[in-house]
Image (spheres, rainbow, N blue to C red):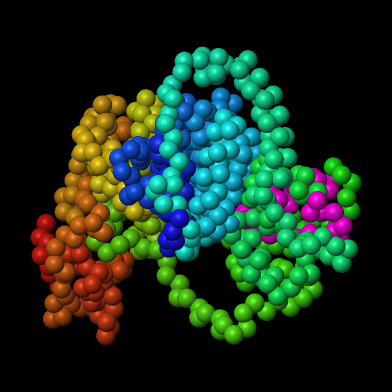
Amino acid sequence: MHKEFLMGNAAIALGALAAGLNVVSGYPGTPSTEVLETVAKNNDGSRYVEWSVNEKAALELGAGAAYCGARSMVTMKQVGLNVASDPLMSLAYVGVKGGMVIVVADDPGPISSQTEQDTRHFASFSKLPCFDPSSVQEAYNLIQIAFDYSEKYQTPVLFRPTTRVCHGYASINVKDNDEYYINTPEGFVRDPSKWVIFPKLSYNAHIHIESRNEELSSVFSDSGLNLIYAEKSKQLRKGIAANGISYTYVKEALQDTDSVRLMKVTTPYPFPEKLALDFLNGLDEVLCVEELDPVIERNLIFVCGKYHLDTVIKGKLTRDVKTAGENTCDSVRADISRFLGLEISGKPDVPPPPELPVRPPVLCAGCPHRASFFAVKTAMKGRKSVFCGDIGCYTLGNAAPLDMVDTCLCMGAGVNITQGIGKVEPDTECFAFVGDSTFFASAITGAVNAVYNQANMTLVILDNSTTAMTGHQPHPGTGKTMMGQVVDKVDIESVLRGIGLKTVVTVNPFKLGEAVETVKRVAAESGVKAIIFKSPCAVLIKNGKPAFIDEEKCTGCRHCIKALGCPGIVIKEGKPFIEESLCTGCGLCSQVCAFGAIGGEQNAE
């Protein structure tokens, strides 16, 4: 055993390796991405690591490995579980042979997600056990316990860290390599009565699952995973129940008082009912502090009703804790102060931090998506158009001055939403923007649907040859895998032609004149057609030397700023100025300037 300073996601990964992990698959999504990447970095070649095309594929691969007795882990963020929910619900009935842990990172806030959904609901919905770590050290320890429970009960289990656990850092105790558990898969054993899901199998499995979860509720009450702090006495009339990172906030707030009983809930499902009953005994009031939804709160209300207790349960349902957004040390301290009728000061010797400046996210300087959006915007000026976006860096195209994302729902949805709008408003020029990684993940089916159902739309693929928003992970179009293999690229243009598109044009968005004319020509055609704007991500490749502004030619009109919104162009002494530390030399601004005042290495079309 030794100490390491680790991010929570890295701790989860190392814990999984210590538990004898054989196979890991997933799809990148903040705040989960570093789990799989850490496994890859520490892979000696004996484990299989894969970025799958989407979460559904990842979960199904992990299930196949677990059928063989391998210990498998699947990683995703909370909205990714929506994509994987179809196999998840059936897998809960079929079960597994090897331990299988599905890591689903929730994103309270939300900080980088479409929703604030709470995976604990998915646990009860799918009837799968759920583990909810509260710290980096616990994440490391708990993932190993999760594998053991999964294997013992032959069921996949959910592991639900939240952003502050995933991205928090701590110095923790980790095992040496020679202490790792070695798991040797038995291999797949044919047994259609187990592995082939039929109504009769599902019926019998459902009976078994209900019985198993009743047993797990009792086991979790006695396991030491869920705990009650403070001596039970008649003097303690109030209690607090908490989970995850909120539990650590509660502990910090309560360090100056011992006037409350505290329950830590590590396994929200099956809920440790027996321990909860012990916790509630003698209490008049309980405050539930949790993220995101009132899961613990509702469970305690149920226990009170079942056992005819008079304890008043407070929390989100009673508006004693805020109903949305992540908890903080300050918000939890304020909630507990009101609940206890005490003034909990926290750390009086530490001055409050200064207010941080508001910095809305923007496309990077030199981002090819800016050029792509600008080309389409220029080509469609004065025409009735709709621009449906998708999930990725290019969602930021909705901001001024580009203002080029009219809709954004979930991954791959823009392609189908475009079709719906076109059916209602056939006189509208309909565009669907999607990135290369998202195209492979979930937009291919939308493109097939458009061809089959005779849509009239322009599909715009923003191909920057990476999965940029989540940290530049490979995908089928990059020709690389997480195992270090160099493979044949899946060519997007060939895929589109293969499903029936007659017009597919690839163009460099930084050749602005050519890009604008391409958009005009392709958009004028009927049916489903596609434009692939292909240029590498600016973060990975700098195109050239920074641009420069000829002060004698510059009139100060600021059109370069008003049209593009590039962070590499700032105002200095009343005139546009190139910030050389940001400028990539893409040359787009030089093509926009009507006075030829901006020069650079790539300013010619």
**For the C terminus, which image quadrant?**
bottom left
Q: Where is residue 198 in the image (x, y as percent from the top left)?
A: 57, 16
Q: In which quarter of the image is residue 596?
A: bottom left
Quadrant that contains the N terminus: bottom left
Q: Is 213 on the left or on the right of 430, as rendered?
A: right
Q: Residue at x 44, y 58 (%)?
A: 2
Q: Nearer the viewer, residue 194 or 382?
A: 194
Q: Does the magenta stretch include residue 418?
A: no
> Residue 280 lies in magenta, yes or no?
yes
Q: Give the range drawn in magenta.
A: 278-305
Q: In this view, does 603 lie to the left or right of 286?
A: left
Question: How far from the left and from the top, in percent, is residue 167?
Answer: 46, 59
Q: Where is residue 156 in the image (x, y as percent from the top left)?
A: 54, 34
Front residue (pair 401, 58): 58
Residue in the image at 37% along x and 25% along y: 452
Residue 523 in view (yes/no): no
Q: Position of residue 406 (x, y in %)?
A: 43, 51
Describe residue 517's horizontal placement relative to residue 308 as left or right.
left
Direction from residue 332 to residue 158 in the image, left or right: left
Number of marks drawn = 0
Q: What is the quadrant of residue 288 in the picture?
A: bottom right
